């Protein structure tokens, strides 16, 4: 399986190249081409992974690859970069977030459906062992009445603000809480943003704490059922991207998306609402 990557500044690309090309741990899958042109970053990745092709434009990957990873750190670029590959029917993994607007996300999904192109997107945290353990314990205790997820996020960050890291705890929370999103409320202080909403009949609270240059809170999830509370602090080891990468490879081989398309929209609905509320509260520029 020949894989191309768009958006190579993302550190997740290092994990992908090491797993597939250096350790050869992904079966027959290899990264064979990078877009973005020749620069220090791409030359280093190509050298590490033995990648022969470094092309200029994302569309230059067409004809060279069987599946594509869109890894731009800013989600606003994902629609533009994903659509040409979806239109050709290629399997596409969009690294978090899928988009920075529900409109962009819907257009990608509609294009995937129109061309029978498998599409998926998620936080790497969605599939790590700690999350799987939390989901299993929550499921065993019955339907959650309330879910709380917490993690670091900078609403003023360079790569899409609250979307860049906020997707991690939101995706975690929504893995625990199925159902249609409603009643999104945003509360903010100088150092925190709290989003509360319903997912189906479950009340969900996501706490986002602004990191500093040297410190950030860990990711954490809690689920409350009728008679139990389960919780888990998520530990990210050197292989934290591997479970999600393997999920993508399975999709590319089977052409079956691991997440239903309506569920791809849910975290974007939440974060778009939060981002709009934060923008409305900012004082006008002078």
Image (cartoon, helix red, strand yellow):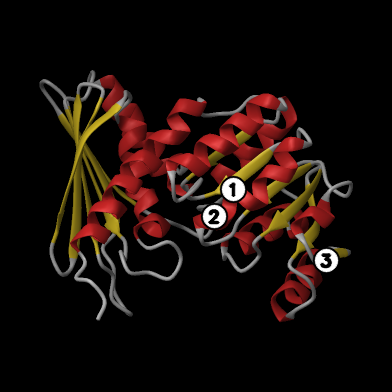
Neighbours of disc 3 within 10 Å: few (<14), some (14-19), many (20+): many
- For label 2, the SS is loop
What residue appears at the point 46 percent right and 44 percent down from the top-left corner?
Answer: 128
Residue 31 is left or right of residue 151, and the answer is right
Q: What residue occupies the far left of the structure in this picture?
A: 227
SS state under label 3: strand
Image position, residue 175 (x, y; %): 37, 33
Q: How far apart are marks 1 and 2 (CA)?
A: 28 Å
Q: Which of 270 and 201 is in front in this view?
A: 270
**Image position, residue 116 (x, y; %):** 71, 25
In the image, which disc is placed on residue 54?
3
Determine contact: label 1, label 2, CB under 8 Å.
Answer: no
The mark closer to the camera, 2 or 3, is 3
Residue on which the image places disc 1? 79
Question: What numbered label is drawn on residue 239?
Answer: 2
Q: In which quarter of the image is the C terminus?
A: bottom left
Expressed as whole percent of the image width and height from the top left, the position of residue 273 reads 29, 45
Q: Earlier in the sequence, mark 3 or mark 1?
A: 3
């Amino acid at each position: 399986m020949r894989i191309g990557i768009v958006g190579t500044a993302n550190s997740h690309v290092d994990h992908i190249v090491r797993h597939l090309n250096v350790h050869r741990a992904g079966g027959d899958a290899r990264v064979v081409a990078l877009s973005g042109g020749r620069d220090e970053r791409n030359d280093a990745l190509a050298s590490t992974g033995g990648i022969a092709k470094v092309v200029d434009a994302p569309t230059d990957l067409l004809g060279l690859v069987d599946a594509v990873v869109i890894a731009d750190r800013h989600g606003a670029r994902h629609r533009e970069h994903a659509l040409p590959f979806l239109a050709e029917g290629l399997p596409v993994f969009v690294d978090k977030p899928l988009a920075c607007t529900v409109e962009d996300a819907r257009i990608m999904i509609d294009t995937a459906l129109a061309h029978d192109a498998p599409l998926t997107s998620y936080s790497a945290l969605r599939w790590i062992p700690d999350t799987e353990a939390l989901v299993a314990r929550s499921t065993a205790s019955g339907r959650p009445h309330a879910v709380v997820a917490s993690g670091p996020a900078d609403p003023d960050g360079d790569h899409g603000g609250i979307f860049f890291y906020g997707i991690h705890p939101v995706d975690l929370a929504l893995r625990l809480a199925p159902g249609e999103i409603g009643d999104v409320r945003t509360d903010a202080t100088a150092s925190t943003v709290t989003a509360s909403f319903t997912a189906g009949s479950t009340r969900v609270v996501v706490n986002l704490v602004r990191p500093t240059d040297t410190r950030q809170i860990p990711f954490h999830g809690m689920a409350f059922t009728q008679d139990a509370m389960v919780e888990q602090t998520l530990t990210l080891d050197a292989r934290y991207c591997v479970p999600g990468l393997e999920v993508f490879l399975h999709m590319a081989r089977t052409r079956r998306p691991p997440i239903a398309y309506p569920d791809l929209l849910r975290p974007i609905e939440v974060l778009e609402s939060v981002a709009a509320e934060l923008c409305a509260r900012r004082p006008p520029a002078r």
